[in-house]
Amino acid sequence: MKSKILASAVATLFVVAVAAPASAEIVITQKAKKFDKKKISIKKGEAVKFVNSDSISHNTHSRSSGGKFDLGVSKPGTAVSKVFDKSGKFKVRCTIHPKMKLTVKVN
Ligand SMILES: [Cu+2]
């Protein structure tokens, strides 16, 4: 009887683990006035966390059609997050530093 309960508990734990969001957090670092990657490919519904590791503020936005967003200005040491819930190719930019460029491809 005891082992049956244990087995059930283990099975429950397994289900919980599997049911947890499959998407690991995707992190992009803003450092030296650059995104640490130029291009990333993610799945629809996944979130990207933008971490400002610079000593200056950055803005994070996209004006790509079908996926416009603006996460505002993030101060040094802070982070902002964006869920990409539409497929497509989105150019992520910083209004303060136009040379900062990242393309997010959402599959
Ligand atoms: Cu910037």
Image (spheres, rainbow, N blue to C red):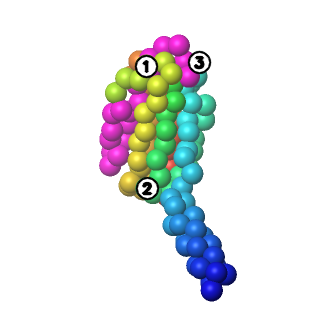
- In percent of width and height, residue 90 lies at 43, 43
Q: Earlier in the sequence, mark 3 or mark 2?
A: 3
Asked whether the viewer can see residue 44, the reply is yes
**Residue 62 painted magenta:** yes
Density class for disc 1 (Cα within 10 Å; few <14, some 14-19, many ≥20) is: some
Q: Earlier in the sequence, mark 3 or mark 1?
A: 3
Between the residue at mark 3 and the residue at mark 1, the CA separation in whole angstroms equals 14 Å
Residue for badge 3: 32
Farthest residue to the right: give it.
3
Please give the name of the residue rendered at 55% of the width and 73% of the height, measured from the top-left corner: 12
Density class for disc 2 (Cα within 10 Å; few <14, some 14-19, many ≥20) is: some
Relative placement, left or right, of 81 versus 37 is left
Tell me: is circle 2 under 8 Å from ligand 1: no
Q: Which mark is residue 75?
A: 1
**Residue 6 painted magenta:** no
Q: Which mark is residue 45?
A: 2
Bounds of the magenta span? 53-71
Closer to the camera, 75 or 63?
75
- Amino acid found under the numbered disc labelled 3: Ala
Instruction: Name above or below for residue 28 compared with residue 56.
Output: below
Asked whether the viewer can see residue 98, the reply is no
- Amino acid found under the numbered disc labelled 1: Lys
Relative placement, left or right, of 41 versus 71 is right
Please give the name of the residue rendered at 63% of the width and 76% of the height, measured from the top-left corner: 6
